[in-house]
Image (cartoon, coloured by chain):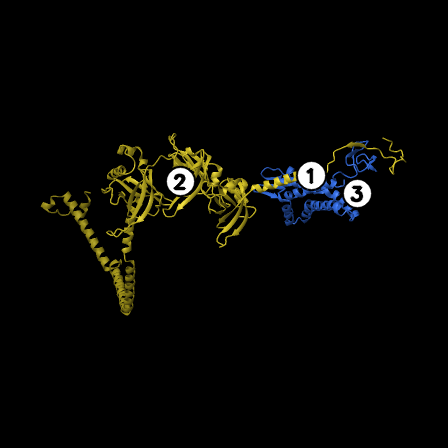
Chain colours: A blue, B yellow
């Protein structure tokens, strides 16, 4: 059986016999790998998701930033930062940080897990909505880096010796890794799997 | 490869444009390498968490009397100003008498949770002794810790209520200063040597039983050998401003010691090379540098002086002066009762330092060691040659008095009285007080004059006189009328007398005139006779010649 492959890189359509796992196809024009579906898509998605879930724990448990002034050093975790913003009546900022730093990564992880799970165990369920969900998840992903940007900017700017000082903490690294991993997970998930019929062989 | 635009009708439903991909063989792998990512994530996440958990050291409970200034999550535990932990919880003990402070120590100092570790609370002090205190003032209290050496671990501690004087194992040496007054010193006040900070005040104790104030100072390593037995400590707080013959002198240690107080010390000149004083050596804390570096006074000799006069104006610390040299100070004054004379003499006790007499003393005592019998013998000699104590006014404005030891001429013989162990120097009344009793005597005599009685007598006399006059007044009026009449008759008599005697027509006058005329004539006759006799002395023998006739008489002329 012959299948058609569109090159993801240069758009050239090629035809080759389908279903042979031992064969790697490449675009005749630009040498980009060609495949029915992204290889090991589900595995990768699961792996990235697992890694991001694992790192999500230190990302929230450890402080992301330490501000020090003349008198004391104060470490902030993401949650304590939000609590502080909320307590100081900066509700808008608190909500933004909460959405960007806690809600979005969590929802992203949950959504991707749902998508990956449904591909394996409920392939026929609400395909259209799942496809739309995937598009949203992919689009919204990088906004979670907001926190990282803020801390990195602060750490770069606020360097007044003993007077005031901001420096990042290991939690920030973990948090950035979570965001990157969820983006990778979203990228590695192949939305075409949503539309695959149950009897088709898994790649 | 075919032209993508060319249709391929032979293909099984495949668009003719489809190109043919490059085919390569590869090893089939069921498992993606991507699983390395979660493994790395596990390792990284676990290492981060473990690292954090590792940093969290032991949790200890410390009991304090009060939790003033301690805030959970904020108050730090500091060892040598390094944060080694944080207060996590503050709660009351079961009996509500004390507070229990839960502290999470850092992992690095987990060996601090041992038997003999001490914890105390450093609260803000209203003092300016150093940045650490100032820091505390702004940052709030923290818990200080002094790590113990024991190996037996412990989780429950009873905190000290005051910081310990010196941290364990801190290199240096502590000394004790006996001080008359604390001044502005406080725990943490610096100790200076040549205006360099070499130590600090670590504490002070006021012994309520012996009434003695001691200040503990700690000289930090490597400066402790600077403190020799000949070191002189003085209170370096504030400014020392002196106006004297050589101009204005302003002495101060560092600015911070002016504000925050401090102690300075110096070695006496010529005491280089002395061995360092052992820890705990006691020194005296002088008031200022001048006093500290003054030549040693040697041991004080306590003397007594009994003054039979008021000591108003004499205060403790007033100088005892010997011919202008300040020999010592007044230590105390005590009222005595002399049953024999029924008087209240004042006993003044003073400490004098015979060494201040310098050469004189050496010459008289042939350099006998200071103190004890030699000085008393010396004093005896002086008293025998007329040394007396006298109260004198040092300042006329404030009438402050001092004790002058001086050789007073014309004073009764006296000796040094050693009756109760303390030599008693005989006294003479002060110049002012000599005058006082005389004035007092005059006043007393004046007082004895019975002005009241005299007044009373005078008054009664006057009233009696008035009464008598009132009684006598009718007779008196009669008498007065009589007197008037008498006077009138006297006047009439006088007028008569006047008329009879002094008037020109008065017979007496006339008689007197006649008499006088006759006397005149008689005198003329007598003269004529004497003239005649002068010219004709023979008439005395022959008698008078008969007068010539009148015409003849005229002729010879």
Q: In the figure, is residue A198 to the left or right of A84?
A: right
Q: Nearer the viewer, mark 2 or mark 3?
A: 3
Residue that badge 3 annotates: A200
Q: In which quadrant is the N terminus of chain A drawn?
A: top right
Q: Nearer the viewer, mark 2 or mark 1?
A: 1
Q: Nearer the viewer, mark 1 or mark 3?
A: 3
Instruction: Work out whether residue A192 or residue B167 is closer to the camera in this orientation and state it.
Output: A192
Residue lying at the far left in this picture: please name it.
B541
Q: Secondary structure at mark 2?
A: strand
Residue that badge 1 annotates: B35
What separation in Å lies between label 2 and label 3 (alpha carbons)?
94 Å
Q: Position of residue A185 (x, y in %)?
A: 72, 41
Alpha-carbon neighbours of circle 2 within 10 Å: few (<14), some, or many (≥20)? many
- Asked if marks 2 and 3 touch (Cβ < 8 Å), the reply is no
Residue that badge 2 annotates: B176
Instruction: Work out whether residue A69 or residue A177 is closer to the camera in this orientation and state it.
Output: A177
**Where on the picture, by quarter, is residue A135?**
top right
Alpha-carbon neighbours of circle 1 within 10 Å: few (<14), some, or many (≥20)? some
């Amino acid at each position: 059986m012959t299948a058609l492959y569109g090159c993801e890189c240069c758009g050239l359509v090629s035809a080759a016999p389908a279903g042979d796992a031992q064969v790697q196809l490449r675009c005749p024009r630009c040498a980009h790998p060609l495949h029915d579906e992204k290889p090991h898509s589900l595995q990768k998605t699961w792996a990235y998701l697992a890694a991001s879930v694992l790192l999500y724990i230190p990302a929230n448990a450890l402080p992301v930033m330490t501000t020090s002034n003349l008198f004391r050093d104060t470490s902030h975790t993401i949650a304590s930062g939000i609590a502080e913003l909320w307590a100081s009546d900066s509700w808008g900022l608190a909500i933004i940080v909460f959405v960007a730093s806690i809600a979005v990564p969590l929802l992203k992880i949950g959504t991707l897990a749902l998508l990956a799970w449904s591909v394996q165990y409920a392939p026929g369920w609400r395909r259209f909505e799942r496809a739309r969900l995937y598009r949203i998840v992919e689009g919204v992903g990088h906004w979670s880096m907001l926190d990282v940007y803020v801390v990195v900017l602060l750490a770069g700017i606020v360097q007044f010796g003993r007077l005031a000082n901001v420096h990042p903490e290991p939690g920030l690294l973990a948090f950035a890794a979570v965001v990157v991993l969820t983006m990778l997970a979203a990228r590695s998930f192949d939305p075409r799997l949503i539309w695959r019929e149950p009897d088709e062989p898994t790649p | 490869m075919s032209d993508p635009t060319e249709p391929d009708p032979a293909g099984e439903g495949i668009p003719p444009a489809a190109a043919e991909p490059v085919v390569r063989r590869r090893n089939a792998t069921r498992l993606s390498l991507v699983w390395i990512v979660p493994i790395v994530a596990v390792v990284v996440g676990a290492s981060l968490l473990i690292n954090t958990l590792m940093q969290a050291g032991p949790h200890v409970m410390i009991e304090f009397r009060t939790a003033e200034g301690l805030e959970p999550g904020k108050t730090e535990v500091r060892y040598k100003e390094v944060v080694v932990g944080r207060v996590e919880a503050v709660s009351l003990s079961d009996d509500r008498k004390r507070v229990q402070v839960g502290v999470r120590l850092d992992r690095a100092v987990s060996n601090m949770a041992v038997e003999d570790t001490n914890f105390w609370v450093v609260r803000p002090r209203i003092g300016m002794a150093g940045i650490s205190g100032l820091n505390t003032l702004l940052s709030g209290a923290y818990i200080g810790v002094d790590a113990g050496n024991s190996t037996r671990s412990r989780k429950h501690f009873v905190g000290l209520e005051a910081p310990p004087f010196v941290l364990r194992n801190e290199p240096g040496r502590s000394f004790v200063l006996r001080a008359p007054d604390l001044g502005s010193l406080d725990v943490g006040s610096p100790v200076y040597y040549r205006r360099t900070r070499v130590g600090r005040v670590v504490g002070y104790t006021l012994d309520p039983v012996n009434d003695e104030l001691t200040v503990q100072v700690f000289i930090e390593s490597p400066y402790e050998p600077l403190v020799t037995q000949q070191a002189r400590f003085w209170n370096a707080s504030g400014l020392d401003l002196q106006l004297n013959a050589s101009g204005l002198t302003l002495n101060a240690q560092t600015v911070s010691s002016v504000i925050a107080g401090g102690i300075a010390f110096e070695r006496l000149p010529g005491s280089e090379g002395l061995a360092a004083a052992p820890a705990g050596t006691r020194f005296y804390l002088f008031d200022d540098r001048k006093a500290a570096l003054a030549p040693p006074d040697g041991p004080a000799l306590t003397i007594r002086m009994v003054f039979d006069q008021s000591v108003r104006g004499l205060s403790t610390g007033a100088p005892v002066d010997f011919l202008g040299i300040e020999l010592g100070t007044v230590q105390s004054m005590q009222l005595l009762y002399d049953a024999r004379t029924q008087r209240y003499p004042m006993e003044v006790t003073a400490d004098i330092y015979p060494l201040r007499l310098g050469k004189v003393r050496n010459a008289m005592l042939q350099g006998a060691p200071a103190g004890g019998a030699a000085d008393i013998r010396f004093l005896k000699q002086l008293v025998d040659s007329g040394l007396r104590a006298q109260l004198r006014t040092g300042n006329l404005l404030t009438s402050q008095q001092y004790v002058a030891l001086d050789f007073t001429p014309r004073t009764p013989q006296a000796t040094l009285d050693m009756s109760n162990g303390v030599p008693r120097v005989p006294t003479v009344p002060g110049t002012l007080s000599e005058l006082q009793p005389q004035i007092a005597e005059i006043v007393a005599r004046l007082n004895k004059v019975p002005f009241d009685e005299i007044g009373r007598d005078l008054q009664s006399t006057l009233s009696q006189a008035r009464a008598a006059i009132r009684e006598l007044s009718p007779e008196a009026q009669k008498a007065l009328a009589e007197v008037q009449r008498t006077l009138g008759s006297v006047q009439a008599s006088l007028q008569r007398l006047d008329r009879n005697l002094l008037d020109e027509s008065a017979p007496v006058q006339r008689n007197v005139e006649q008499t006088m005329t006759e006397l005149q004539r008689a005198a003329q006759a007598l003269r004529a006779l004497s003239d005649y006799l002068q010219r004709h002395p023979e008439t005395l023998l022959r008698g008078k010649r008969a007068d010539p006739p009148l015409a003849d008489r005229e002729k010879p002329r």
